[in-house]
Amino acid sequence: MSAGPVAFPAQLVTLLRGSSRLVALTGAGVSQESGLRTFRDAHPSTGSGRAGLWSQHKPEDLASPEAFRRDPKLVWDWYAWRREAVKAVRPNPGHYALAEMEQHVPGFTLITQNVDGLHRMAGSQNVLELHGNIQRVRCAECYTFTEVWDDDTESVPRCRVCGGLLRPDVVWFGESLPRDQLEAAVEAARACEVFFSIGTSGVVQPAASLAFAAHNRGAVVVEINAEPTPLTQKADHVFHGRSGEILPRLVEAVWKIT
Ligand code: BV8
Ligand code: ZN
């Protein structure tokens, strides 16, 4: 799937050079080249040991309050496994290119569905984490955050304030998004001149509606994804390939080559 030389239309290059309000929405695809599985291929088909346990579940079934009520240990261990996977990887050139775009464009807002924290690790500042962050843990009852917890116990660690079960500070299916992050994301999408949709299948709501909100406000929509999505038809520019290859070339073409 390695992209040959990507040609960026002169009209897009000129537009980006003259723009001051850009938004990029990212999904699991932008972290794929760092070695993290996307949601689509979240579980090894034939899981060995503990991982095998998860391969019997669809991610959206595990990432839900119902699953946590049903089997908190299974869900806790899944996130502990993903947390270790995130600790073992580094941002890729796609993450760094987006951090660089922020340096070139003051009005750049990065909206991510990813809970891996790799955008900030790459140096991005203005990041809206719509679905939370897997490195943060809080009490499921009283919301108290904690930095320390014991991972290798038979049961799920408990809150030192109210004794409630601890859980990852991520948004599960059926749960509403953090209001401040969502409101800022909707505002940025509605006010931007160019909206990038990068490495996302555009299925999960309300994140998937942001590109359409931007489009309806006259923004130019650019899709960078390994395969077509429900947004492809609406997008003004489409680059199907690997974000870790396309984004550095875009930054080069727009902000380095004068
Ligand atoms: C809510 C955190 C109020 C946890 C996540 C309207 C219509 C239908 C359904 C709904 C609706 N409104 C609400 C819903 C329900 C639901 C929803 O959208 N369901 C879907 C499945 C239809 N939404 C919710 O529940 C949201 N809450 O709305 O609350 C409410 C509740 C109920 C009913 C009404 C209102 C909460 C959603 C957030 C859930 N939490 N994550 C965790 O991570 O464990 S979502 C999680 O899945 C990710 O964060 C991400 O958002 C999503 C996965 O999508 P992607 O990131 O796009 O990844 P995916 O693998 O799908 O695709 C990767 C893409 O990258 C692919 O296209 C691939 O080709 C491409 N790619 C791969 N490699 C590369 C690449 N591209 C470029 N380069 C590469 N190298
Ligand atoms: Zn508590």
Image: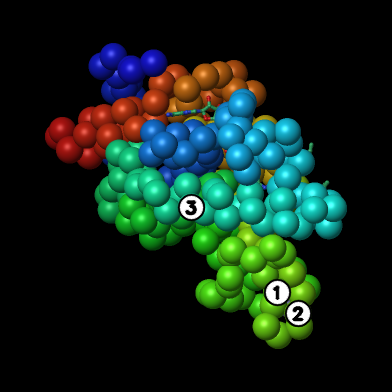
Image quarter of residue 169: bottom right
Q: Which residue is mark 3?
A: 84
Label 3 and label 1: CA atoms lie apart by 20 Å
The residue that appears at 61% across and 26% down in the rendered structure is 45
Per the rendering, the mark at residue 158 is: 1
Q: Nearer the viewer, residue 8 or 111?
A: 111
Dot 3, crowdedness within 10 Å: few (<14), some or many (≥20)?
Answer: few
Residue at image position (50%, 41%) is 26
**Residue at 28% across / 34% down in the picture?**
248
Element carrying mark 3: helix
- Give me the residue at 44% from left, 19% from top: 240
Q: Nearer the viewer, residue 131 or 159?
A: 159
Estimate the spatial distance between the alpha carbons at disc 1 and disc 2, rounded to whole Å: 5 Å
Residue 249 is left or right of residue 91, and the answer is: left
Q: Is residue 115 something that shows in the picture?
A: no
Q: Position of residue 196 (x, y in %)?
A: 47, 36
Q: Which residue is mark 2?
A: 163
- Residue 11 placement (x, y as % from top left): 34, 24
